[in-house]
Image (tube, rainbow, N blue to C red):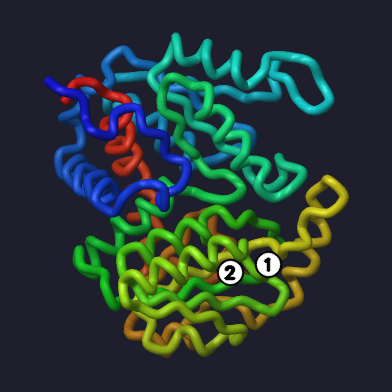
Amino acid sequence: MAKSKLFGKDLICSQEWSEEELIQVLELAEEMKENRFNYQPLLKDRTFFMFFYNPSVRTRQSFECALTELGGHAQFLEPKTMRLKTATTAGETVEDAAKVMSRYGCGIGIRILEDMVSRYGEGDELIREYARWAEVPVISMAHDKFHPCQGLADLMGLRTHLGKELQGKKLLLTWGHGALARSWSSVQETLLISSRFGMEVTLAYPAGYDLDPQIIEQTKENCRAKGSRFEITHSPFDGYRGADVVYSRNWVSPDAYRGGRFHKGEEMKRAMRYKEWICDPEKMKLTANALFIHPMPVDRGHEVTDEVASGSRSLIYEIAENRLHVQKAILALIASDLW
């Protein structure tokens, strides 16, 4: 058997993969969902290292299940318990750690979010440093800029319910209030991957909650390439009109990082001011019977009401399951030599 053409490829942001490569992942994930336990030989006796700078529920569970169902093992690692070099402590360099782990395992996953970095982009830089030195593929399991596995899981759910041709379908990505301070990773990934597949994208948020300007420009470029529209509104209502999909989630302001630290308390206090920014049944009535999606955990009663989150048009649990199938497909394509 031959290796996949994607063998050894890192996954840090979906934008760095071609549309054909992303479709290959989605089609394999859909096949794996239909025939869930038929792929054990692909990573038999292989180990995938998971670096968790931040805790998780779905990410750890879904990756561990994925490795088990591919016949391998996912090893959970907490960097704080390891002798790794930091800005203030001596220890193993990224180069040394990556090269040693490459001799042991078939891949490395890293999760590092908003409160584990001192400035936006630092987590992205760390993952790319591991990818630079590792001789096995590196996967982002969510970091301060991107969350590619979540973006693919979202897309898989939309393909199931809206059809595999998403061109022209309208996505509203709207900010949600609450005592929260969440990173830009999932929302920026959704902007990029939905625009790659031709969706009409509306981004809604209160003034002062701008996302990374480079990601906004890339989203605009993706839409131009597909002949679709991208628009920004600061109204908590307007973007709902005619939407096919609604994604309501909190994210931090660009002021979250100052003086080399993350101002979590200030962000949480600020986010509670905008109580009208909640996805509720009244706003959903403005849509084209829209689906509701969210990467979870959901802050019910703030980002979205229970009626919507647990309603008949909500895909939150299905998409959470899709994380497992998408990650199985990614791992099979980039880490298995049994194709």
Q: Position of residue 228 (x, y in %)?
A: 35, 77
Residue pictured at 41% horizontal, 34% vertical: 10
Q: Quadrant of residue 36?
A: top left
Q: Are marks 1 and 2 in contact (CB under 8 Å)?
A: yes
Instruction: Report the Cα–Cα distance between label 1 and label 2.
Output: 7 Å
- State whether residue 179 is above or below residue 146: below
Q: Quadrant of the C terminus?
A: top left
Give the residue at mark 2: 303
Q: Quadrant of the N terminus?
A: top left
Question: Is residue 312 visible in this depiction of the protein?
Answer: no
Residue 123 in the image: above or below residue 317: above
Q: Secondary structure at mark 2?
A: loop
Coordinates of residue 106 in the picture (x, y in percent)? 38, 19
N-terminal-most mark, 1 or 2? 1
Q: Is residue 220 left or right of residue 26?
A: right
Name the residue located 52 percent from the left edge and 14 percent from the top edge: 99
The residue located at (35%, 62%) in the rendering is 196
Picture quarter containing residue 315? bottom left
Residue indicated by mark 1: 178
* Label 2 Cα neighbours within 10 Å, binned few <14 / some 14-19 / many ≥20: many
Amino acid type at circle 1 is: Gly
Element under disc 1: loop
Q: Quadrant of residue 333?
A: top left
Residue 264, horizontal then vertical, whole percent? 78, 54
Viewer-side residue, 57 vs 260 = 260
Mark 2 is on which residue type?
A: Glu
* Relative image position of residue 198 (x, y in whole percent): 31, 70
Residue visible at 40% across and 70% down?
Answer: 292
Q: How many marks?
A: 2
Q: Residues within 10 Å of mark 1 (few under 14, many from 20)?
A: many
Q: Is residue 223 visible?
A: yes
Relative depth, front residue between 96 and 328: 96
